[in-house]
Amino acid sequence: MRRNIFETIFFSEILKGLSITLGYMFTKPVTYKYPYEATPIQDRFRGVQYIKTNEDGSTKCVGCYLCQKVCPSECIHIETDCGPKGERLIRKYELDLSRCIYCGYCEEVCPVDAIHMGCEWNTVDNTRDNYVINMKTLSQNYKDNVAGNWKNKHLKKKLVEGVQQ
Amino acid sequence: MLTVKINGKEVEVPQGTTILDAAKEAGVHIPVLCHDSRLNPFGACRVCLVEQVGMPKLQAACTTPVTDKMELITESEKLSRVRKTAIELLLINHPLDCPVCDKGGECTLQDLTYEVGVTKVRFDAVPNDTPVDHTNPFIERDIDRCVLCGRCVRICDEVVNIQAISFLNRGTDTQIGTSFDQPWNCEYCGQCISVCPVGSLNNRVYLFKNRPWNLESEKTVCGLCSCGCTVSIDYEGNEVFRMNEMPEEGVNHGYMCAKGRFGFDFMNSVKRETEAQITVGGEAKKASVTEAVEYASEKLKAMNTDSVAIVVSPRITNEEAFLAKKLADAIGTKNIFSTETDAIMPGATYEDVENSDAVAVLNINVTESNPILGLAVRVAARKEGSSLITFYPSETALKRVTTKFVTGNPVELAADMEKFCAAFAGAENEFTADAKRLLDAENPVVVFDAYNMADAYIAQEIQKACSKVKLVPAKAKNNSAGVVDMGFGVNAPEDFAKGVETGKFKAVISFGENIAVRTGWSKLTGALSKLELLMVTDPFMSDTAKLANVYVPVATFAEKSGSFTNLEGRVQLVSKAVDKGVVSDAEIISGLAKGLGTELPTDAYAVRKLIEKEVKLYADVQWDGGTVAYPSVFKTELAKVATTAAGSGKFYLYPASLRLHSGSYTRWSPDLAKVYGAPVLDVSVEDAKEMGLNKDDKVKLKGDGFTGEFVVEINKQVTKGCISLPEDFVETADIFSNGRYLKAEIIK
Ligand code: SF4
Ligand code: SF4
Ligand code: SF4
Ligand code: SF4
Ligand code: SF4
Ligand code: FES
């Protein structure tokens, strides 16, 4: 291989390489200093579910069992009954986050737009039981998602917008 | 035979076959919505349209009979367009309720929507929106979802023959309902629910409890009466969610009654006991089943063998009854009892009844006591050229189809039946023509109450005069015939009463029988509680179980395997669907036997093999639906019994059958109890008026040796001068222990 004498004397290749490194030194970093800094959540992120509520605070879920049926990891457990006025009443709605694979099928299948994948991803806890969340928590999750009340306080308010749409 | 070509495939079918049936023969699927093979062709939905080669118009497959050399096409571009439009038109007014509709997942309309591929309705949707009707205690009615297929109306007319509902209004205003929107005056049989292809009629006992895709099913036989209906127990885990029909299957053709369809919930009852109990010196303490059984067998060992009596309930399986007999042998006692006797055994099948051209129903309200037999009688009676004569103190649901309905107080009625019987022998009276109809008929059938000896005598005499008459003794319980076959019919129930009263029996073991509410035995409660050993098995803490020193909770028919013999003498298999964590009677029996040094098998199959060896009648019986060949209906010649009403009083009191209860099991169903909880005194309209009684009044009933307080129901069908009360309630068992017919006085 023929070598350029000029390049050999002045190490210009090394300088070329260093200039790239130098260039990056003055651009914004692409990594996040977790846990000191929040990782951004994209619009289509699939985090811990929430279930929407109606204006009067009642749940939007009608207890159709479709999410239970579709869930590939069988983590949703529903019990329904006939209410005093002959309405469909949800006795129990449980979702086991320790089994959930966050596939989003439940969100996809829900015919009444009740269950959604939220932005929260922090589920760390010290007992298994706490991973089983019920309708109350799921409804609270809705409020939290709307208000941007994240467990991870670093989460930025602006990410909430995706939820409200 | 006609040759038809369907989609290029040739089949031969008999004259009169519809295109739909011919297609079934050819293995070709044609979608249907309003068709039900048990009902007459109707042709309301036009989903089943097919093309006939050479015909410009499309044909409805369910109503059009085939002609020879007919060529049909069931799949084509044009047809799928037409079918799609038919469904789209239905969906204009159909609410988008599937997520909350109880039919979701097993709805014909949903299935068809998928099948024909409707994804979008081209028309503007105008969903119906009327409030859901909850007035019927068992049926939820949402007319918005109705597709006007008419199946409910047709089954209620053609099969049930109650005609409770009909089409109202016309055109786009058409609705299913009753005239002037009156509450449904109905049998609560739920047949309409079972045929509704959509979620317009729903079972309120199952309502919103689960989804069909979560349920597993077990085919079994209902254990609530002697009809022997094939049903499916739908369960998830160990909870029974419904007892459902199996369309067209079994002797019941997939029909059921209110008890089965709405009363099954007693199996899940929280009132069921889970722990055995031993009572010593008036103090009850919980014990394990083994302890209880050991305690009992220790006591038995110390006992004189002749002072032990075993009672079985006709609710237990053949296998268990057989084992109980073996236990009696092991103990060495001959004192084995049940409410049944071997005096009268099954004589004909449902098929015989359905094919009959002349039926006589003697003094039994068969549509209430044995609903499926009632349906068979109706089939026979509605046939062209057939006749039905019914005797009963009050009018019954058979009135609509009966050629002649004879009512009167029990004594008059007995006299009438005697005259009817005499007419067979040639006597000239008002029944001569009726008797002649049976004599002239090809397949005459007589249905009677297997527990009423006076009626049985008449049935026997009729058969003597007309040998081709087939007899149907209507037995009461799911295994009434079976326990007798296994040996529990040799002793008269009265002997048990005597044995207990005289103190001959020191130990009584009752497998499932609720002695305290049985007519004839109810007065034994005092003596029973003084026994040295009273062992009772029952799923519930029954009135008898409360008196027991040893009580063991046991399985219901959904929790064990075995077989029942129904009123036709048909043996049918029962299979275990759920496990409620309690043992079966079989296990208790073998536990007791073990304590006495005898090994008995508990596995149903092993026991059946033993039965085949040891019980002659069952030597080569087909366990899955074969009939037992009884040599004759009557064991011996019956003697004439005079029908009298004991005591004095203005009214004749007789025991009534209930469609909602058949003994003490169904009383634990919260849903049935809500509609019929305590016994109600039925009074005729005339008498009520005369005495100034109103519905729901509380009155005293007084007769010779009994009193009672009951709520009044004014019943249009009851004959003046008669009143009726149901049997098998704590409140009424003592009354009817005085006699079947009584005189009584109503005191306001
Ligand atoms: S996200 Fe997937 S795994 Fe998790 S609950 Fe929904 S369906 Fe089940
Ligand atoms: S799919 Fe939606 S409406 Fe149905 S049970 Fe699940 S959350 Fe509730
Ligand atoms: S009847 Fe069928 S189609 Fe109609 S709402 Fe119910 S499940 Fe859906
Ligand atoms: S429950 Fe039976 S009697 Fe009542 S409307 Fe339905 S089919 Fe007719
Ligand atoms: S209620 Fe059901 S069975 Fe009756 S007409 Fe309507 S859809 Fe048909
Ligand atoms: S199924 Fe033939 S018209 Fe409805």
Image (cartoon, coloured by chain):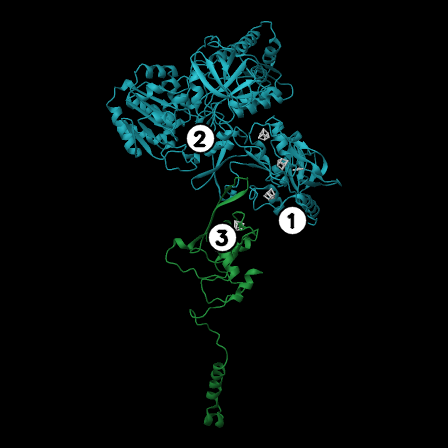
The residue beneath circle 1 is B118
Q: Nearer the viewer, residue B166 or B378?
A: B166
Q: Nearer the viewer, residue A121 or B281?
A: B281
Q: Drawn colour of chain A?
A: green
On screen, residue B194 above or below A26: above
Would you call the spot at circle 2 few (<14 residues within 10 Å), some (14-19), or many (20 or more)? many
Q: Would the CB of label 3 be found within 8 Å of ligand 1? A: yes
Q: Nearer the viewer, residue A39 or B312?
A: A39
Would you call the spot at circle 3 few (<14 residues within 10 Å), some (14-19), or many (20 or more)? some
Q: Which chain is cyan?
A: B
* Residue B644 picture location, percent across and down: 48, 9
The residue beneath circle 2 is B668
Q: In the image, are marks 3 and 2 on the same chain?
A: no
* Residue A144 picture location, percent across and down: 49, 59
Q: Amino acid at mark 3?
A: Cys
Left or right position of B256 against B736:
right
* Residue B150 picture location, percent across and down: 65, 34
Q: In the image, are marks 1 and 3 on the same chain?
A: no
The residue beneath circle 3 is A71
* Residue B283 picture location, percent across and down: 29, 29
Would you call the spot at circle 1 few (<14 residues within 10 Å), some (14-19), or many (20 or more)? some
Q: Which chain letter matches label 3? A: A
